[in-house]
Image: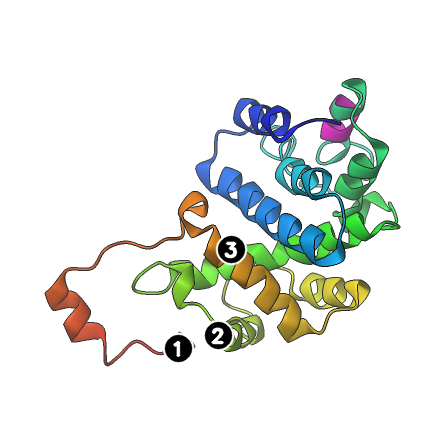
Amino acid sequence: MPTRQDAFALVQEWTQSESLRKHMLSVETAMLAYARRFGADEESWAVAGLIHDFDYERYPNDAQAADAEHPAEGVRYLRSLGWPEEILQAVLGHAHYTGVARASLMAKALFAVDELTGLITACALVKPSKAVRDVDVAGVRKKMKDKAFARGVNRDDIVQGAEALGVPLDEHIGAVLAAMQANAEALGLAGVPMAPSSAASTSTTISSDA
């Protein structure tokens, strides 16, 4: 079983984009929370979340080829290192276009949290504080309806993922949001300090669903 240190070393080696690294850390965070919820193996679920996009920067797969580039190339490399098939199948399954069925609970969870962490991150970064602590479920649901916001986030994947896990959508959003809030510093979502005068002048205009 590869360790988190093994996975993070690959993320650092293969991915230079700080935002993409933070995304993988966010998915790791959400996967760990769901592993605890379902009584699953925490380390393997977290590692699956951390590694799922490690090859994306090298092999972006704009053509969405089923067996080339991301995530197929990364999975081939991980398989050569002897990584467990459960993790590899989950990584393949998080992309629709691979055609790989999400048979395990791990795979279903990875698919369910992937797009949602991106949406929550986007919701946090448009807050004046840029802090995930100021995001709530109602605000995330509102942004889901705004197709112009975070266009790259697939809303259908979020809905379908929650359904596959058997978790009501609001509960799913709340679970992932709470996990990200608890790990905000590592995810770069703890926010930026505001000057006292600025905080006072904006306190009456900040809406909970901004």
Q: Which mark is residue 180?
A: 3
User: At x 63% / y 54%, what residue is drawn?
Assistant: 33
Magenta-colored segment: predominant secondary structure: helix
Horizontal arrangement in the rendering, residue 49 relative to residue 25 (left or right): right
Mark 3 or mark 2: name the one nearer the start of the chain: 2
How far apart in space, not on screen, are marks 1 and 3 (Cα)? 18 Å
Sort mark 3 into few (<14), some (14-19) or many (20+) by Cα contacts within 10 Å.
many
Q: Position of residue 191 (x, y in %)?
A: 33, 55
Q: Position of residue 208 (x, y in %)?
A: 39, 77
How far apart in space, not on screen, are marks 1 and 2 (Cα)? 7 Å
Image: magenta residue range = 73-77
Residue for badge 1: 208
What residue type is disc 2 on?
A: Gly
Q: Position of residue 55 (x, y in %)?
A: 64, 31
Secondary structure beneath disc 1?
A: loop
Q: Which mark is residue 139?
A: 2
Residue 41 on the magenta span: no
User: At x 56% / y 75%, what residue is drawn?
Assistant: 141
Q: Is residue 9 above or below residue 62?
A: above
